Amino acid sequence: MFNPSKLAISLDREGEEPIYRQLIRYIRSQIESGELPAGTRLPASRDLAKQLNISRISVVNAYAELRAQGFLSAHAGRGTFIAGDSHGGGNGNGSAHAPETPTTPDRSIREMMRMTRKPGVINFSQGSPPADFYPVRHLRDAINAVLDRDGTRALGYEVAEGYAPLRAAVRDYISALGIRCSADQVLITGGTQQALDLVVQALLSENDTLVTENPTYLGMIDIARTRRVQVHGISLDEDGIRLDMLENFILDHHPKLIYVMPTFQNPTGTVMPLHRRRQLINLATEYKIPVLEDAVYHELRFEGEPLPPLKALDEEGIVIHASGFTKMMHLMLERGVMAQQLERNNRELARRRDVALAAAARYLPPGSKWNLPQGGLYLWAQLPKSGPTAAELYVSAVHAGVSYAIGSVFYTNSCGSHRIRLNYGAFKPADIEEGFKRLGRAWRELACDYAEMEKSPLL
Ligand SMILES: Cc1ncc(COP(=O)(O)O)c(C=O)c1O
């Protein structure tokens, strides 16, 4: 027999592991031990939620996930059953077969997001540029040309700071953005993420403080945690990081580094106007705190006037500029080819942005809000606070065939519960439309349950 009181004893309400995941674990262990034989009918989600004194959403999510894993089957009008024997009463060994068994319990929302790379899911959660933008032909030609020219020498070790002609090419490339430097001020890294990590390692020791925007790039939060530095996020307004709050924080806490994304901030898409850029540099110069500028989205502009990167405005040498070619996906080809490619890509991004805005208006629940990106890959949306949180909606959304980045992971504190980030740039218009449609449907289904749950005084 199904024994919910057993679950109640073991649920850890204060821990990091979401309740619905604990529930999945316990139901699975009862199935695997044979205590819950195939065919057993599980209580309705509302009843189980009442018995365990937990939210009904947690039960709905747990059942949905167990169904996807093959442990449960649902029969319209009859209820939810342990899978394996449709006649009920056990199948001899008493356990259902799971096609895919995660080996480690996932302890956080980020893990939950990583779990859902399932075929058929329109995955708006990723940070990658559109796969159809990759310049495969140019890439192949460039690799062949280098191998023909240099043979195996091309595959050997290089000096740590990077291949000298490439450093010179990067210097020339960024001079077109207004950044003046010499080739020996350029360091080649394996992507922007590595550059951010190296700067943190070089400038901060354990327990030093790093200031970021809040929300900020998830990868930087990870770097800070791995390097054991304190990370503190400062809120944004429509012009970027709030300088009044930043200054107060500097006075009280003496941070060692300020990390910002002035153009198409990830995840909000905010662009810092020129006057705020100058003020930030002045503030950092006054307090002698280096600014790490992450410019990976700088050139993904499809609307509005281009602005100089912070580094182009920096006369004191207080700014470190980090960027990469991942998001633009062009190699060190001659500038003409790259410019053409970039222009084409940005035109297509604008088209996809328009489709995403129209789909958001059509399918996101009433009361939702979102930004109007002028560049970059992401729509940053706020779902109505009266409905499920982004984390609560997640499993249902994935089962409906769509996923997104849960907004709270970008915050350095516990904000953003109803926010989501959607990478519209990575998908063709038809998929964008379909993805938003699925998302709207998943929200509506869950919101109905949610509204009922909210009405019930017992839950
Ligand atoms: C703001 C930001 N910085 C850095 C990166 C990582 O860039 P790269 O792929 O060049 O390491 C990303 C990727 O999503 C990003 O969004």
Image: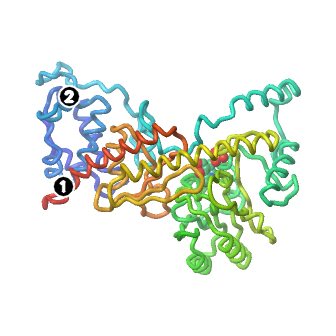
Q: How far across and down, in percent of the image, does residue 445 sit?
A: 25, 46
Q: How far across and down, in percent of the image, does residue 411 sit?
A: 48, 61
**Does residue 176 sit above or below 277 in this rendering?**
above
Disc 2 crowd, CA 10 A, few/some/many (<14, 14-19, 20+)? some
Q: Amino acid at mark 2?
A: Gly
Residue that badge 2 annotates: 34
Horizontal side of residue 130 vs 405, given as left or right: right
Q: How far across and down, in percent of the image, does residue 59 sit?
A: 23, 46
Q: How far across and down, in percent of the image, does residue 286 sit?
A: 72, 79
Horizontal side of residue 377 vs 151, given as left or right: left
**Camera sees residue 417:** no
Disc 1 crowd, CA 10 A, few/some/many (<14, 14-19, 20+)? some
**Does residue 82 sit above or below 270 in this rendering?**
above
Of labels 1 and 2, earlier in sequence is 2
Q: Quadrant of residue 436?
A: top left
Q: Quadrant of residue 22?
A: top left
Element under disc 1: helix
Q: Which mark is residue 453?
A: 1
Q: Amino acid at mark 1?
A: Met
Cα distance in 3D space between marks 1 and 2? 32 Å
**Camera sees residue 8:** yes
Callout in the foreground (1, 2)? 1
Q: Nearer the viewer, residue 367 or 174?
A: 367
- Mark 1 C-beta closer than 8 Å to ligand 1: no
Q: Quadrant of residue 148?
A: top right
- Mark 2 C-beta closer than 8 Å to ligand 1: no
| Residue at 51% across, 43% down | 126
Across the whole image, how many numbered discs are drawn on residues? 2
Element under disc 2: loop
Q: Residue furthest top?
A: 92
Q: Quadrant of the C terminus?
A: bottom left
| Residue at 52% across, 70% down | 235
